[in-house]
Amino acid sequence: MRILLATNWLRIGGIETNIVRLTTVLCRCGHDVTVAAAGGPLVERVRAAGGRFHEVALDRLGSLDIRNAVRRLSAIVRDRQIEIIHAFSASSAAALRLARLHARFHGRPWPPVVASIMGLRTSPGELPVITYARALVTTLGAERVFVISPEIGRLVDRLPVPRTRVFECPVVGVETDLGTGVTAAQMQAVRAELGIPPAARVVLTIGNLVPSKSHELFVRAAAKVSEVVPDARFLVVGEGHQRAWLEAEVDRLGLKGRVQLIGPRSDIPVLLSLCDVYVRPGILDGFVGITVLEAQVVGCPVVSFDTIDVRPAVMHERTGLLVPPGDTDGLAKAMLRLLADGSLRRSLAVAARQHVERRFSMRAVVSSLEAAYGEVLRRRLSPT
């Protein structure tokens, strides 16, 4: 199949990393994959995976950008003879819809479009009407809407999308060999780089420094853990506009040197391999989070706030620990429990890895997508 994947950009982030992984496995399976986005540091990884990249301004759609985006998308579809398009964002879906109208106006065919809502609220204070509108724009006119989590499914149920077009289909996954090549020397080198003592326990979280990730809850829980385990170290991987505010929060709580905001990193498997506990501090539903799956497949036990969409991966006392949303005392207690109990860490890690291999392996995700894409194409060719 000749497939076009369209999203806002290729910055460092969960959705974007997943698109690189989809490109990698789809290309290995013999498909021709093109990615359209505004660009970013992951572009070269798309190309290294065997995919093609075309820069299209899908991250901002002012009047001039819309015209340019429509022209670029029309040219990509025509020149690459695209057979199916997968939209991963509201802005890309909107531009694709306009490009389809443009093609039909000129009497040219347009391939079927499928869409995935990859998240819900972008911040804790986002109005429900904004969330709804973004989902509506993403799905309007799509021949198939892929639901990737229970809470996203509930939102889709409220959209004017025919039920016959809605399918539960995995879109996000992780390579099961992630971290297998990490060596003790690499972990020691990172510890030395970050000034972490050899025997210190390490707690990690990963995510852009934006309100939707709730990193302040991680920092506040870290303060409580530090009272009991003063040599513990807490790492926050990611970048964003909340950096200065979070640094001030770290200073206010007297955690300088214990909590480190280490920016974006390319050595995530090494960091996950050396840490003792991984924390998902987000309280917003949407999807479990690709970093949670990465931690689980590497063998790092996970603590998370209990949201509906984290439960498919983190089952309390089985594949991780869950605490009530926003309860920083509970989050700190769960972290302390894991830091103190090596046997529990190991048992949760083993069960979590087995679960991820069964349900969230990238190969299983791509197999499901191949079947879904194929079904859409068959129905397009035989509409009766």
Image: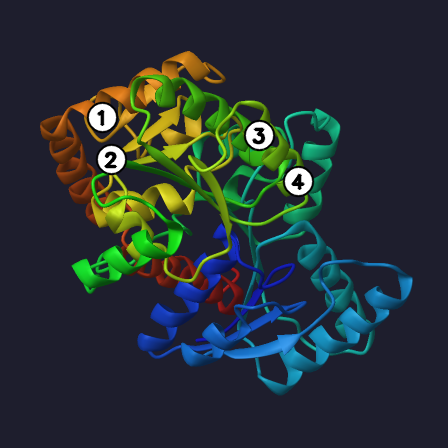
Q: Amino acid at mark 3?
A: Asp
Q: Earlier in the sequence, mark 2 or mark 4?
A: 4
Residue 311 is at least partly visible in this image? no
Query: Label 1 near label 4: C-beta < 8 Å?
Result: no
In the picture, measured across the screen, residue 245 lies left or right of residue 312, that is right
Q: For mark 2, what is the residue?
A: 301
Give x and y (percent) for residue 305: 41, 23
Q: Which mark is residue 73?
A: none
Give x and y (percent) for residue 368: 34, 55
Q: Amino acid at mark 1?
A: Leu
Work out how far the residue at label 2 is from the one at label 3, CA to CA, in angstroms. 28 Å
> By what rule are the colours in the image chosen?
rainbow
Q: Earlier in the sequence, mark 2 or mark 3?
A: 3
Q: Amino acid at mark 4?
A: Ala
Q: For mark 1, what is the residue?
A: 338
Q: Disc 4 vs disc 1: which is toward the camera?
A: 4
Q: Earlier in the sequence, mark 3 or mark 4?
A: 4
Q: Residue at x 33, y 25 (%)?
A: 230
Kind of element beneath mark 1: helix
Work out how far the residue at label 2 is from the one at label 4, CA to CA, in angstroms. 29 Å
Kind of element beneath mark 2: loop
Query: Label 2 near label 1: C-beta < 8 Å?
Result: yes
Work out how far the residue at label 1 is from the one at label 2, CA to CA, in angstroms. 8 Å
Q: Residue at x 89, y 67 (%)?
A: 64
Q: Disc 1 vs disc 2: which is toward the camera?
A: 1
Q: For mark 3, what is the residue?
A: 251
Is the residue 281 above or below the residue 349 in the image?
above
Kind of element beneath mark 4: helix
